[in-house]
Amino acid sequence: MTIVEVRKRDGLARIATFQADEKTIHLPAVIETGELFHSLSHSRMENVPLGAGPAFVAQYLPKGHLIPAWIHPSGDLTLPPGMAVMVPCWHTALAHPRKYVEWLAAMKTALPPDTAWYAPAAALPSNAAILSYSGFDIFDFTAVDLRSSQGIFCLPEGEFPRGTMEGGACDCPGCRVGDLKAHNRDRLIREIALARQFIAAQRLRDLVESRCRMDAAQVAILRNLDRTCGFFEKAVPVARQGTLLATTGEVLQRPEVTRFSERVVSRYRPPAADVAVLLPCSARKPYSLSQSHRKFRQAIAGRASELIVTSPLGLVPRELELVYPAAHYNVPVTGYWDAEEREFTGGIIAAFLEKHRFKRVIAHLEGGALAAAEKGAALAGVELEITCRGRPLSQESLALLDSALSGERKVRHDVIRGTSSWQFGLAIDTRNLVVKGRYPWIRAFRGRTPFFSIDEATGLLRPTFEGWNLIPEGYRVTIDEFVPTGDVLAPGVVDADPRIREGDEVLVTGPCAIATGRAAMPACEMLRSGRGVAVRVRKVKTLPRT
């Protein structure tokens, strides 16, 4: 019997434990797989090419109750939870980025989430990060040992001639005694351990982006993963720990970025306003706490809907400036916007202005942000009023902004309503709610009864039971007939809203109890996993027996 228990997720990557034959392996790991998977000692190298068709795979791929189970993109992928699987020839997929993602998606979608994935003869220090990012957990020394026999010196930055060892590029124990095999193994072990640390911090993407710069195929794999709709995005949490580093061009397609901008256009409901003002971003987050935005807000004086133009998010409405990743990204500030940034941001501005027809749109912008806004306005058929003369913070520019809004009515800004529309897809009725607290530590009450609070770490709403009454549908997890005494485990989940991602606030409902909490895995994993926490529960209410 084998057991896989996921402890921490970072997209497809996981920190987990794998138990087999009374042995426990902490994943991801690089091991002597023959010591763990005894069936491989009898293997006769039945390596079926990844491009083989179903008939060939059915005839030649090993079958039976093997540990690990041999799988193939064109083979039978019906396996129980808790298994370990091996994808023979996966090292060949690294040279075919598009097929890599197609094959990965086919297998990952079909197999249970709590499955340990073994990539035989594939791992090198230079590709271990992208393999982990793709959801592989178990690696061996075959590839690095082969490089050692070929006189190749392996580093995370690539493979080099053996003579590189003598140049001081590494000071590991193997390098000190001139043992190439020991060095290559040591670097692979260290790279897997580093990947594990980045997974724990939910920052593996940052490691992958830095490593893949040395390999065009890995960059292509990363881009194809980002663009595979309906597969990779489901695994990406709605909010991560720490800062989102926007330091490469790939950030424009990161699931967190595209999700945020797509929801701004499709879900977010702006306050009722005749005028929208497009503003530049600031280095300090949230924007409202920056000195520049204090001056902008003083000039606007609540007379317009405020929209911040920024790369890589495109457009951040003032009501959403706390929501991840709007308050959590860090971008190199140069003042220069490349063509791709202008195109991306302009498209979002165009879509937003087409959906929400303001009587006037003021652009208090300069440089690349202004160019993106002009492009978006032209696509939407909107005429921009530009209030910048030189720098946006100059006295003349601020005076022009104030003058342009003369006579405009005050706008009722509502962070609870705005955030709920982005988060849950509906704008709740907040007319009888009173918002208390010092921004950004906000709570919403009716009388003395709390309805919502804003999570300072993510900017998302945390509804109480009373707050959920204002959200009549969606983001529900249905459980079986039991009262949770702690967190809700995946085997107890009967149904879940498919929109739920890890980190989403959810309402747990069942015949015996209701509970509020935060999703610990996406809905698709809740319904297919045999183990693991599905919802981290905050409060439970037992229902009366009928």
Image: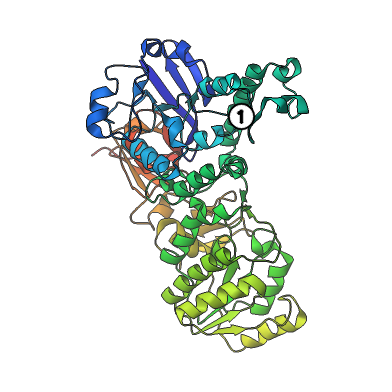
Q: Is residue 260 above or below residue 173?
A: below
Q: Quadrant of the N terminus?
A: top left
364 lies left or right of 263: right
* Quarter of the rendering containing residue 232: top left
200 lies left or right of 529: right
- Camera sees residue 525: no
* Quarter of the rendering containing residue 190: top right
The image shows residue 36 at horizontal and vertical percentages of: 45, 13
- Camera sees residue 115: yes
* Quarter of the rendering containing residue 22: top left
Q: Is residue 419 above or below residue 110?
A: below
Badge 1, how many Cα within 10 Å: few under 14, some, many 20+?
many
Q: Nearer the viewer, residue 148 or 190?
A: 148
Q: Is residue 389 above or below residue 169?
A: below
The image shows residue 192 at horizontal and vertical percentages of: 58, 28
User: For the residue labelled by badge 1, is the local secondary structure a helix, a strand or a loop?
Assistant: helix
Badge count: 1
Q: Residue at x 44, y 33 (%)?
A: 92
Q: Quadrant of the C terminus?
A: top left
Q: Nearer the viewer, residue 379 or 80?
A: 379
Rendering colour mode: rainbow
Disc 1: which residue? 191
Q: Nearer the viewer, residue 13 or 179?
A: 179
Q: Residue at x 45, y 43 (%)?
A: 97
Instruction: Give the residue type at disc 1.
Output: Glu
The image shows residue 513 at horizontal and vertical percentages of: 34, 39
The image shows residue 455 at horizontal and vertical percentages of: 55, 50
